[in-house]
Amino acid sequence: MKTMKHVFTILISILMAANVFGQTPEKMSYQGVIRDSANELVANNQVSMQLSILQGGDNGNVVYQETQTPTTNVNGLVSVEIGTGTIISGNFTTIDWSAGPYFIKTETDPTGGSNYSITGTSQLMSVPYALYAKESGSSIPGPAGEDGDDGVGITSTTDNNDGTFTLNFSDGSSFTTSDLTGPQGPIGDPGNDGIDGEDGDDGVGITSTTDNNDGTFTLNFSDGSSFTTSDLTGPQGPIGAPGNDGIDGEDGDDGVGITSTTDNNDGTFTLNFSDGSSFTTSDLTGPQGVASSGNNPGDMLYWDGSEWVIVPVGSPGQVLQLNVNGTPEWMGSGYATITTNPVTNIGPTEADFSGDVTSDGGAAVTERGFVYDTSPSPNLTDNVEIVGDGTGSFNTTITGLAIGQTYYVRAYATNNSGTIYGNEVSFQTNSSYELGDTGPAGGLVFYDKGSYSDGWRYMEANPVDLSTGTDWGCSGSLIPGSQPSAIGNGPQNTQDIVDNCTGTNIAARLCNNYTFNGFDDWFLPARQELDQMYLNLHAQGLGSFNSLSTYWSSTENNNISAQGVSFNTGNTINNNKLSSYRVRAARRF
């Protein structure tokens, strides 16, 4: 929408000097070109216009206001006579044109309704003569006044061959319009067929083909040449269905089977076969089995010389060694015993972790804490949060987590036997912020576009102003790319200004160089982003903004003016770049 508004304002500033002039008393003519939000001409369509005469400045007193509903022509041009519309306030015939300066403000709804989305304000550079002369108190000429300063006029116009034009003024300055190219005209009728060309040379065709019996073929051409293809044999086809069973063969000889088995009582067995033969195995007796059984998983047995004795399972981390009596024994301390509790107080970027060390395993716990990651089974090579030492309960708050991300957490404890991990728990951070919430950098959330794209969804405003008064910078220079006002353009606008403007304390550079709570991706918001800051923070009593001040946006009008927002009224302020306004940085995430 900003692009539309900007294009229209440029056209107004051109037309005011040339197309607002005195007619018969009580009215004056006005023309403008209307484009929609896609920068397309609004042609042959009825639009709604609200026209105001302002006294003293572009935000001056409204001395007259009316509405009209004209229809644009095929080029999007609209023509009206101010003074003949439906009067909202004031009396056009009683305006004292000598009490200027006067400005004309146009507000347009290209759909014909009353939602005036296109706004432009320009100074009436010359008094409409017929209207002023009507107020003359005497026909006797007064004394000649001093010569005024030379006016600034258009000395030449350059067609840039890309739909734009550059206007060169008598004071040496220039101005380049937006693309004024109209829509594509209809395609004309096809032309007549051209005359037939001369016959081409005879083509070369295949005269014969030879199968080389190896999957290749030789193609013989009419000009005597030939070409042999690569192997064109296709892949193996699927196996066909089985054929029918063949006829039964003759019966074979009788097989030889085991008719009986004899246990020889010495670990061997004799197998007797049907053909009268026999076979005796080797000793098949296995080793002696264990006579006793354990009590718990992990129990072991050892032979004390007369019987099997149980060695009970040890603690994790202990070492099985032979004691001075030559029997096995678990020695040393074991691992600590630790539990990971469920995660609580889960937010978009933070959560509370807690755990319990219920036993030190026989040696002091020298370190305890948590390991976490976005993959299961985190360990000390992943994210680590140390929370003291010893046994008992412990907890901490983890910040800087990703929004809407699933994490896996394990408590851990370390003693001289090593590090042991507790059970694993998982959780997912919240996926949304509310307007007015505190953002990851400590600012206040003032915009939510509804879903994540291009790496961000929300915008937060810095909690304090970076300046109580500084200029926009680069007055007299047009900054490439810094004109868009739509939401999402603030970072690029800021970068364009910083890259092309050398001022040290200009508004955009203050934001670009700012670091707060470890975050250094701040920018000067575009004008519509600043509107959201006003509506969703200041208008709700949040953010500690100055209610009597104007704040700069990163949106530029032209080479000498840029846009700000009044935090007293919420209105857009178009003013010289040298003006001193407040600065509030923003970032997105």
Image (tube, rainbow, N blue to C red):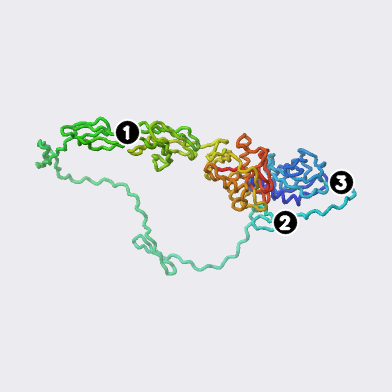
Q: Nearer the viewer, mark 1 or mark 3?
A: 1
Can residue 182 be seen in the rendering of this structure?
Answer: no
Residue corresponding to mark 1: 362
Residue corresponding to mark 3: 136
Whether tag 1 and tag 3 are in contact, CB under 8 A, the answer is no
Q: Nearer the viewer, mark 2 or mark 1?
A: 1
In terms of secondary structure, where does tag 1 sit? loop
Question: Would you call the spot at circle 2 few (<14 residues within 10 Å), some (14-19), or many (20 or more)?
Answer: some
Q: CA distance from mark 2 to mark 1?
A: 91 Å
- Image coords of residue 255 (percent x, y): 15, 43
Identify the residue at image location x=24%, y=38%: 321
Identify the residue at image location x=63%, y=38%: 545
> In the image, what residue type sits under mark 3?
Ser
Identify the residue at image location x=66%, y=37%: 547
- Image coords of residue 360 (percent x, y): 35, 33
Using the image, tell me which numbered label, if any, was put on residue 135. Answer: none
Lower position in the chain sequence, tag 3 or tag 2: 3
Q: CA distance from mark 3 to mark 2?
A: 33 Å
> In the image, what residue type sits under mark 1?
Gly
Front residue of 457 and 212: 457
- Image coords of residue 69 (percent x, y): 73, 42
Front residue of 209 and 371: 371
Using the image, tell me which numbered label, if any, was put on residue 169. Answer: 2
Identify the residue at image location x=88%, y=45%: 137
Front residue of 296 and 97: 296
Q: CA distance from mark 1 to mark 3?
A: 109 Å
Lower position in the chain sequence, tag 1 or tag 3: 3
